[in-house]
Image (tube, helix red, strand yellow):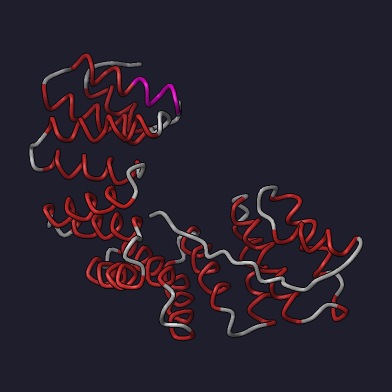
Amino acid sequence: MLRRLVFALVLALSATGAWADRYEDCKQSADLDRQIRGCTQIVDRGKRESQKNRAGAYWNRGNAYYLKREVDRAIADYDKAIALNPEYVDAYVNRGNAYGDKGDLDRAIADHTKAIALNPNVAEAYYNRGNAYGDKGDFDRAIADHTKAIALDPNHADAYTNRGLAYEQKREVDRAIADYTKAIAIDPEHANAYTNRGNAYASKGEIDRAIADFDKAIALNPEFVFAYNNRGLAYKKKGDKEQAIADFRKALEIDPSDQDAKNNLKRLGVTR
């Protein structure tokens, strides 16, 4: 499931000279190493810095670690931000995402639930909790949370996409297709929505529609291994073995370790 961090500029203190640069370093996110350095210099000031700014610096540094895929370090920083500010909604949301990435879904759900208790109008808390419920296989709760996220943010394309996935798991394929189509209407460059809708069409036996959606996903993301694999499966269903092999080989070209592509080729009697 695609999780979404909450971002906001929380360090509003004005400063002059060298410290002004530290605050700007910590607040920006274009250069993650620079962000980490700037935030570290702020938290290292200890009580010479306000509690609010230390909490914000830990949160910003946690976001940088999360984006660098250093999830344990991110969690440690979110812990510190929450210790300094126990009502830090965004820190609970982002720590929940980090726990979700580690597969610790109960902790993820607890954090998103805490964020919702503190502020019931944060769409991302419902969206990310819905993802955790979906990962647990609790699709009814996932649908309920994505529906709430959509009510709070009607242009939340990812919530439509992931609610569609939950509907698909419940075998409500037409509802899933409707959600993917809505996501695409909101964001015409949503490659995941095209791929998911392609899978749904394939499950209905509408292979040409499925291939058209996989084509679009690949046009948007030429490195989309999942889309190549699924298009290959669609071509296989059509009886176009040559094109199926080409797609599986392309998936392996992009990711030589992709086991799905290897298995798909093996089923077609191709070793590579």
The residue at the far left in this view is: 205
| Vertical position of residue 254 compared to residue 170: above or below | above
Q: Quadrant of residue 128?
A: bottom left
> Which residue sits at x=50%, y=59%?
102
Q: Where is residue 51 in the image (x, y as percent from the top left)?
A: 75, 82
Instruction: State the quadrant of the C terminus.
Output: top left
Instruction: Quarter of the image for the N terminus: give it.
Output: bottom left
The residue at the point 22 percent across, 14 percent down is 242
Viewer-nearest residue: 220 or 142: 220
Q: Where is residue 40 in the image (x, y as percent from the top left)?
A: 79, 63
Where does the image place residue 44, in percent across and percent down from the top left? 85, 69
Residue 84 location (% of width, % of height): 69, 82
Residue 162 found in image quarter:
bottom left
Q: Is residue 50 left or right of residue 7?
A: right
Left or right: residue 14 versus residue 173 is right
Count all numbered tags in the image, as a single digit.
0
Dividing the picture into quadrants, the one containing residue 54 is bottom right
Q: Is residue 3 left or right of residue 61?
A: left
Q: Residue, x 44% and y 75% (percent of image)?
A: 122
Q: In this view, does 224 lie above or below 38?
A: above
Front one among 100 and 130: 130
Residue drawn at x 14%, y 38% is: 202
- Prevailing SS of the magenta stretch: helix
Magenta range: 249-254
* Frontmost residue, 118 versus 253: 118
Magenta span includes 250: yes
